[in-house]
Image (cartoon, helix red, strand yellow):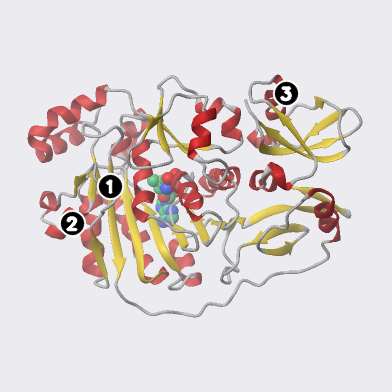
Amino acid sequence: MNLPEKFLERMEKILGDEYEDFIKSFDREHYKGIRVNTLKISVNDFKDISPFELEKVTWSKEGFYIGEKSRPGKHPYYHCGLYYIQEPSAMIPVEVLDPKPGEKVLDISAAPGGKATQIGAKLKGEGLLVANDISPKRVKALTKNIKVFGIKNSIVTNESPKNLAEKFKSYFDKILVDAPCSGEGMFRRDPKASKNWNNYSVDQCCGMQREILDWIPKMLKPGGKLVYSTCTFSPEENEGTIQWFLNKYPEFEIEEIKNIDEIDNGRPEWIQANQELTKAKRAWPHKIKGEGHFIALLRKKDGDVFNLNSFKINKGNIDSFIDFKNEYLKDSLQGNLHLKCNKLFLVPNDLPDISGLRLGNLGLYMGELKKNRFHPSQGLAMALKREQVSNTINFSSDSIEAVKYLKGETLLVNGEKGWRLVCIDGFPVGWGKQTKEHLKNNYRPEWRMK
Ligand SMILES: C[S@@+](CC[C@H](N)C(=O)[O-])C[C@H]1O[C@@H](n2cnc3c(N)ncnc32)[C@H](O)[C@@H]1O
């Protein structure tokens, strides 16, 4: 593999004896991984039906290595949201953050959603996930992944950290900053990353990281935890950025990472930083089965607490939704129904006033009220279980019908007229509208199988 000269010079200088092993690791294939979505299936049940051979990732109960030749993005289970395709080391930061049901968690630079979907699954539907990214294009992918995963207790925002800090004062129990970085840890997986390396200097990246981190103290509760992670090796963007943060915000302290033993400590001596920074962790591709990562865990010792105004629920005439619910839904869903421009949302409890923020998604978008009829959304299908709906149709994952449905085709099948929740091996994947002999396809066009 062709690696930038300046990168090699720096790594040789700092790694010394380890450099040879480090460089050799770039000739190996990268490890492919998936993470099971426990909102939809338990890890044990997934093992029973997995289309891929699985080998455990030691630092994540839900994480598995899959064979190099596996194509997880092509399987119908991917469309059902049974797993997320994720590089195994990228599972570490959320394991360190350790979100618990009921907590309020911010993933401030979340797109495309690898770590946000991991947080959402760990919250088990209780508490709130705010998944944010500054890039409008990347927020689209983030929103899709949150919906496919069936995460109802979340909002997706497309905002600057400054605008978020105005709305979420001392609000979060935990914040993840999975920072934009020079991406050196991804060179093996993505050769483009090494080509782009010269365009993103370490200095520039440090600037972006500080710009984000500067707003975190305002948003974290006293006692709250911050995880900072990157996928790069450069000491300046790792130990250096955290040293800068600790100097500027003395109300924070760095904590020992206790639940991940497999990876090395931080290396403050590389940039004459404080010895405390050995408490951070570094994943090295020549030492573990995964790519390069840096992770630091910090705690906010003290600070002020604020009372925030609550989100204002907008009520209106939702009779057509009530008719839909009475006809098709067996359970009532938890949350507050909020109507905005004929669109109906199920908004999580405890949401503060977020007026003025650019949103990619608000709670669970249920569907649209169109001319006295309710049209259920793709996201609603993904957030439901088969048992919650009275009119369903199931296809086997190896059937031609499953593929046809995912490609957006109309299916020649009989059944009870009206909306039907389409499932694959019992897992909901979308809606269809049954007429006399046809099932009209309502699978979202942008999500179709190619
Ligand atoms: C390493 S990626 C995040 C990967 C993501 N956490 C995941 O696991 O899928 C860094 C992200 O930071 C975003 N970003 C860059 N500057 C930002 C800023 N000032 N505020 C919020 N997000 C920012 C980028 O658009 C990019 O999506």
Q: x, y (%) of residue 275?
A: 12, 58
Q: x, y (%) of residue 352?
A: 56, 71
Amino acid on which disc 3 is placed: Glu
Labels 1 and 3: the sequence-earlier one: 1
- Residue 6 in view (yes/no): yes
Q: x, y (%) of residue 304?
A: 38, 80
Which residue is rendered at x = 39% and y = 36% of the image?
A: 87
Which residue is rendered at x = 53% and y = 77% of the image?
A: 308
Q: Quadrant of residue 33?
A: top left
Element type where label 2 sits in the image: helix
The span from disc 1 to disc 3 (Cα, nearest Å) is 44 Å
In this rendering, the answer to whether 124 lies above or below 82 is below
Which residue is rendered at x = 57% and y = 57% of the image?
A: 153
Element type where label 1 sits in the image: loop
Compare residues 285 and 50 and report the one nearer the observer. Answer: 50
Labels 1 and 2: the sequence-earlier one: 1
Residue under numbered circle 2: 277
Left/right placement of residue 162 relative to residue 420 reads left
The span from disc 2 to disc 3 (Cα, nearest Å) is 55 Å
Labels 2 and 3: the sequence-earlier one: 2
